[in-house]
Amino acid sequence: MSEMEDREIVELETENGESVSMYVERYFYYNGEEFVLLSDAKAQDDHYIMKVEPLPDEDGQEMEEFVPVDDELMEQLIHIVETTFDGDEEA
């Protein structure tokens, strides 16, 4: 199996109600909160960072909801991703 086939794919809904497929690149923590780095399945150079919020489904199982973050926090998270994860991709 290729590396692309091994990655988790999630379906998200845009503000316009359209469904988009995203690859989960990695989860990470910042200030005690969990975030996820996603890439667009169609345009893999397009990356997104979202907050991970756990919520129970109807069976009581824990699920994850990906929530957008505000612009100020996004700037900090982008800096963390660029300085921490860029070296990982070159290895």
Image: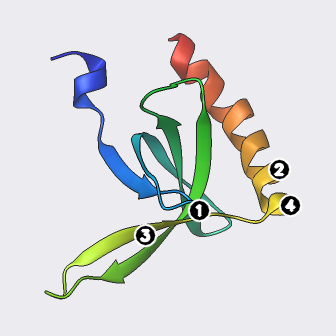
**Mark number, residue 65:** 3
Q: Give the structural element (helix, strand or loop) at label 2.
A: helix
Quarter containing the N terminus: top left
Q: CA distance from mark 1 to mark 4?
A: 20 Å
Q: Residue at x 43, y 69 (%)?
A: 65
Is residue 33 found left or right of 59 in the rendered image? right
Tag 4 or tag 1, which sits nearer the N-term?
1
Q: Is residue 8 above or below residue 29?
A: above
Q: Nearer the viewer, mark 1 or mark 4?
A: 1
Q: CA distance from mark 4 to mark 2?
A: 5 Å
Classify residue 32 by image quadrant.
bottom right
Which amino acid does the dot numbered 2 rest on?
Glu
Q: CA distance from mark 1 to mark 2?
A: 21 Å
Q: Give the structural element (helix, strand or loop) at label 1.
A: loop
Which amino acid does the dot numbered 1 rest on?
Glu
Q: Find disc 4 in the rendering and name its residue.
A: 72
**Mark number, residue 44:** none
Classify residue 5 by image quadrant.
top left
Q: Is residue 9 above or below residue 36?
A: above
Callout 4–callout 2 Cβ contact below 8 Å: yes
Tag 2 or tag 3, which sits nearer the N-term?
3
Q: Find disc 2 in the rendering and name its residue.
A: 75
Q: Is residue 74 above or below residue 60?
A: above
Tag 2 or tag 1, which sits nearer the N-term?
1
- Where residue 22 appears, as percent x and y from the top left, is 42, 41
Q: Find disc 1 in the rendering and name its residue.
A: 15
Q: Nearer the viewer, mark 1 or mark 2?
A: 1
Tag 3 or tag 1, which sits nearer the N-term?
1
Return the residue nearer the eye: 52 or 42.
42
Q: CA distance from mark 3 to mark 4?
A: 21 Å
- Where residue 74 appears, as percent x and y from the top left, is 76, 54
